[in-house]
């Protein structure tokens, strides 16, 4: 079984997903259409204009042919490590034959690899890279600090809400 986590990124003022989140969702759609994804998890807790990013991502996926029945929401991840922790807890009974697929933008991949290396022990994991729409100052430069935090605190850097927002 191939189980994917699509990491959230951002939303526009009206609550719709921004270009980088759209790019990540498009990568998930491509992988689903090619038979490489069986289940998709959306665990980001953010919302804007009373629209939950995870639900906006889900709507985007559904409009592009991903069945609603394979999408699972657990909106408790407050950052990258938090989204990953919520996802890994949710898929707790994975087997060695299963693959966890982490979908994000290219600059985000080293941190995801590091965090996954500390968390994924019972199965394989792979990375799917969305190549468009990274913002140099806001993303790439700040990522070095976020990667350093993950390296120094790989287990304690996660922000997880105790329950999903209503």
Image: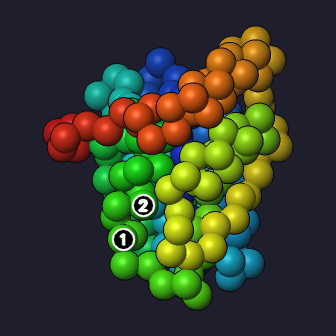
The answer to whether any part of residue 62 appears in the image is no
Q: Residue at x 63, y 73 (%)?
A: 124
Q: Residue 114 in the image: x percent, y percent?
A: 65, 46
**Rendered view: 14 above or below 103:** above
Tag 1–tag 2 contact (CB < 8 Å): yes
How is the model colour-coded?
Answer: rainbow
| Label 1 to label 2: alpha-carbon separation | 6 Å
Badge 1 element:
loop
The residue identified by callout 2 is 88
Q: Nearer the viewer, residue 48 or 140?
A: 140
Q: Residue at x 57, y 46 (%)?
A: 115
Q: Which mark is residue 117?
A: none
Q: Residue 16 in the image: x percent, y percent?
A: 49, 33
User: How packed is label 1: few (under 14 Cα within 10 Å), some, or many (20 or more)?
Assistant: few
Q: How many marks do you count on the picture? A: 2
Q: In the image, 38: left or right of 136?
A: left
Q: Residue 38 in the image: x percent, y percent?
A: 54, 79
User: How packed is label 2: few (under 14 Cα within 10 Å), some, or many (20 or more)?
Assistant: some
The residue identified by callout 1 is 92
Quadrant containing the C terminus is top left
Q: Nearer the viewer, residue 61 or 81?
A: 81
For residue 49, which quarter of the picture?
top left
For residue 37, which quarter of the picture?
bottom right
Badge 2 element:
helix
Q: Residue 120 in the image: x percent, y percent?
A: 53, 63
Q: Residue at x 44, y 74 (%)?
A: 70
The answer to whether any part of residue 108 appears in the image is yes
Residue sticking out furthest to the front? 152
Quadrant containing the N terminus is bottom right
């Amino acid at each position: 079984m191939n189980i994917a986590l699509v990491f959230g990124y951002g939303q526009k003022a009206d609550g719709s997903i921004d270009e980088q989140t759209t790019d990540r969702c498009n990568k998930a759609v491509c992988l689903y259409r090619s038979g490489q994804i069986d289940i998709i998890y959306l665990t980001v807790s953010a919302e804007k204009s009373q629209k939950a990013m995870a639900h906006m991502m889900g709507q985007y996926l559904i409009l592009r042919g991903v069945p609603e029945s394979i999408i699972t929401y657990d909106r408790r991840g407050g950052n990258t490590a938090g989204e990953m922790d919520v996802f890994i807890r949710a898929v707790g009974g994975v087997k060695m034959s299963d693959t966890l697929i982490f979908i994000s933008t290219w600059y985000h991949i080293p941190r995801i690899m590091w965090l996954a290396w500390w968390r994924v022990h019972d199965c394989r994991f792979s990375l799917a890279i969305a190549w468009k729409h990274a913002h140099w100052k806001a993303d790439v430069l700040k990522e070095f600090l976020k990667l350093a935090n993950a390296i120094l605190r790989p287990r304690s850097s996660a922000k997880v809400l105790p329950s999903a927002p209503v």
